[in-house]
Image: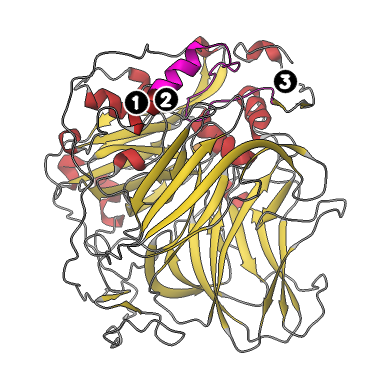
């Protein structure tokens, strides 16, 4: 598929706004309501100097605690935390089963962890050293308040970086907790363009030691691009992942490779920052013998609750505290593809937790009983209580159907639609550029939904509905630029008359990835307090590649637009030059958010031939 639009229309010389520097407001000490009857209690008295420590994790900095409303208040530390990321074609072999083509950041898998404090400014310079791929880096879960153009979604908020290009992202960490960053260009993140983020801040429960981020992902011995190519023509679903990696490592089915190993000490409490960075696998996660005390879901601190299992949708995070109070020894940590969410893999994920002083060995522990049934959105209680106005629901709520089927004009490739459209964007002509040109003629394939709002206090409500006949698959729905207020979800077809009473308007769970149940519905809301073009998409990489994506255009007149002549426009110019030249060897053949490079032939390494019916694949260059 060719680029949809020529680049170079005259710009209208719109004025640019400077990125807002939010003022620190007075901390609001809110009592979180607990709908299950638990009380969160009054925040402990924190020392004037902050006082965060093993027995005072609620405290953070002067005037800031885990009870601070982080939608309106954050410490302006003035600190700038800088990182350089180089994205390169290379090979990797994370479980020892064999070297394969990868795209890695700074030669590592996963890429470097970005560590900052709440309120710091994060500045990341990205170099695209890939030969035949654009890229863009999305900072998953960050609200990007008034910094829409830093969101890293090529074709939406920026042009893709051409091979050889460099771009610096800069934004403030107005929230704290655990997240990840990844390429938003095609299936790149499944081939290695991924890393984790730890934003230090207060917590809703105490712990002694922060063990840091623990990413978990499915892993394929073919590339993610190849897997996506097979998925696009399959009548039986996408290929099975071969393994599940924890912290970038695992043993293979034949015993090669190594498990991730963690040492814990009797009597201590540990914070673990769990992240599902998979391509296609929703995960069921537990540590044998050690229940998880959940303290945050995505970027939201929650009233602590305890569970033996977590269901983790793709893109979701859980910050948990474990207590080392069992017989000293070795314990399995498990991350398995969750059949309850229709995920499968050839092998489960394992890591080993060992008590200090014990010899590391394969554990003999067994998984706890009663794994979860169904693919759930847990009812967590945000510590910072926020209510949603129910009165405007009936007038504002709109339904977004999710449907599925081969589309004849796309060579009968399998495609997904949301709101009737399967998204295709041009990585060289982002939505923000249309806004900058005051051009409302968004192509239909951009799947733009303009949110009816002129005020940051207006709420918007969306019913995401599995269409009749859609395959019964849960979709982890990721919203950029906002937390979704999860009013409810259920099976069947939502109707206000039948289901309104089920919706939770009083301090509903908030997070940025929410499960849309199989053959069911999901109702979300958010206040239109962050002008921008914000993607909402399924985080199953194959599905977004097949178009399961839309964008909310929110208060476009208030978006902070890029300055004329700025790096943002230079990125577009370089992309246009690249596309017009002879070095762009892989035509776009998917949504553009997931441009496929197929077959991947990098540094002389030729991927194995596929048994894909080639006539069903959109034209692509011959094998090199
Ligand atoms: Cu999906």
Residue 204: quarter of image:
bottom left
Main SS of the magenta part reads loop
Q: Nearer the viewer, residue 345 or 432?
A: 432
Q: Is residue 252 magenta?
A: no
Q: CA distance from mark 3 to mark 1?
A: 29 Å
Write down the residue under mark 1: 447
User: Please, which residue is most extreme toward the right here?
Assistant: 254
The correct choice, above or below, for 318 with respect to 527 in the image is below
Residue at the (22%, 74%) spot, across then down: 30
Write down the residue under mark 2: 423
Within-10-Å neighbours for mark 1: few <14, some 14–19, many 20+? many
Q: Does mark 2's beta carbon lie closer than 8 Å to ligand 1?
A: no
The correct choice, above or below, for 416 with respect to 308 in the image is above
Q: Secondary structure at mark 3?
A: loop
Magenta-highlighted residues = 573-600
Tag 3 and tag 1, C-beta contact below 8 Å: no
Q: Position of residue 162 (x, y in %)?
A: 50, 26
Write down the residue under mark 3: 612
Q: Nearer the viewer, residue 63 or 347?
A: 63
Residue at the (61%, 58%) spot, across then down: 284
Q: Does mark 3's beta carbon lie closer than 8 Å to ligand 1?
A: no
Q: Position of residue 442 (x, y in %)?
A: 28, 20
Mark 2 or mark 3: whose residue is earlier in sequence: 2
Residue 362: quarter of image:
bottom right
């Amino acid at each position: 598929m060719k680029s949809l639009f020529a680049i170079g229309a005259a710009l209208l010389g719109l004025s640019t706004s400077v990125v807002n520097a939010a003022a620190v407001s007075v901390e609001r000490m809110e009592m979180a309501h607990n709908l299950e009857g638990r009380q969160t209690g009054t925040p402990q008295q924190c020392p004037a100097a902050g006082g965060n420590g093993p027995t005072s994790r609620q405290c953070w900095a002067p005037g800031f605690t885990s009870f601070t409303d982080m939608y309106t208040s954050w410490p302006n530390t003035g600190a700038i935390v800088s990182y350089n990321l180089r994205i390169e074609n290379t090979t990797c072999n994370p479980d020892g089963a064999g070297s394969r083509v990868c795209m890695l950041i700074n030669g590592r898998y996963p890429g470097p962890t970005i560590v900052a404090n709440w309120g710091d400014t994060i500045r990341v310079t990205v170099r695209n050293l890939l030969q035949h791929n654009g890229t863009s880096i999305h900072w998953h879960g960050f609200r990007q308040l008034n910094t829409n153009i830093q969101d890293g979604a090529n074709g939406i908020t920026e042009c893709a970086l051409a091979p050889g290009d460099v771009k610096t992202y800069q934004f403030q960490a107005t929230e704290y907790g655990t997240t990840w960053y990844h390429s938003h260009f095609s299936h790149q993140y499944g081939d290695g363009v991924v890393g984790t983020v730890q934003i230090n801040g207060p917590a809703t429960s105490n712990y002694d030691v922060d063990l840091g981020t623990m990413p978990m992902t499915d892993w394929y011995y073919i590339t993610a691009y190849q897997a996506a190519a097979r998925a696009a023509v399959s009548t039986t679903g996408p290929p099975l992942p071969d393994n599940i990696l924890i912290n970038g490592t695992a043993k293979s089915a034949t015993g090669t490779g190594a498990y991730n190993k963690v040492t814990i000490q009797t009597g201590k409490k540990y914070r673990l920052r769990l992240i599902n960075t998979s391509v296609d696998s929703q995960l069921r996660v537990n540590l044998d013998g050690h229940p998880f005390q959940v303290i945050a879901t995505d970027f939201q601190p929650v009233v602590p609750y305890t569970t033996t299992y977590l269901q983790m949708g793709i893109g979701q995070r859980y910050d948990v505290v474990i207590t080392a109070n069992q017989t000293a020894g070795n314990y399995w940590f498990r991350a398995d593809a969750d059949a309850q969410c229709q995920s499968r893999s050839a092998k489960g994920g394992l890591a080993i937790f060992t008590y200090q002083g014990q010899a590391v060995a394969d554990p003999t522990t067994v998984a706890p009983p009663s794994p979860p049934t169904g693919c759930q959105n847990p009812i967590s209680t945000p510590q910072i209580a926020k209510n949603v106005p129910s009165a405007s629901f009936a007038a504002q709520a709109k339904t977004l159907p999710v449907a599925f089927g081969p589309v004849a004009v796309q060579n009968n490739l399998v495609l997904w639609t949301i709101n009737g459209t399967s998204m295709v964007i041009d990585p060289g002509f982002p939505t923000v550029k249309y806004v900058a040109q005051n051009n409302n003629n968004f192509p239909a394939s951009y799947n733009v939904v303009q949110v009816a709002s002129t005020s940051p206090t207006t709420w918007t409500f969306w019913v995401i509905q599995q269409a009749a006949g859609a395959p019964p698959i849960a979709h982890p729905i990721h919203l950029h630029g906002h937390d979704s207020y999860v009013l409810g979800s259920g099976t069947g077809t939502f109707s206000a008359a039948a289901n309104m009473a089920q919706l939770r308007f009083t301090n509903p769970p908030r997070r940025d990835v929410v499960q849309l149940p199989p053959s069911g519905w999901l109702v979300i809301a958010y206040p239109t307090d962050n002008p921008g073009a914000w993607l909402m998409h399924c985080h199953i990489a194959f599905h977004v590649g097949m178009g399961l994506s839309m964008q909310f255009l929110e208060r476009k007149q208030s978006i902070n637009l890029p300055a004329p002549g700025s790096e943002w426009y230079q990125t577009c110019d370089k992309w246009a030059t690249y596309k017009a030249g002879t070095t762009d060897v892989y035509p776009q053949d998917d949504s553009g958010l997931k441009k496929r490079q197929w077959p991947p032939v990098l540094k002389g390494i030729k991927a194995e031939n596929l048994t894909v019916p080639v006539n069903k694949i959109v034209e692509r260059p011959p094998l090199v």
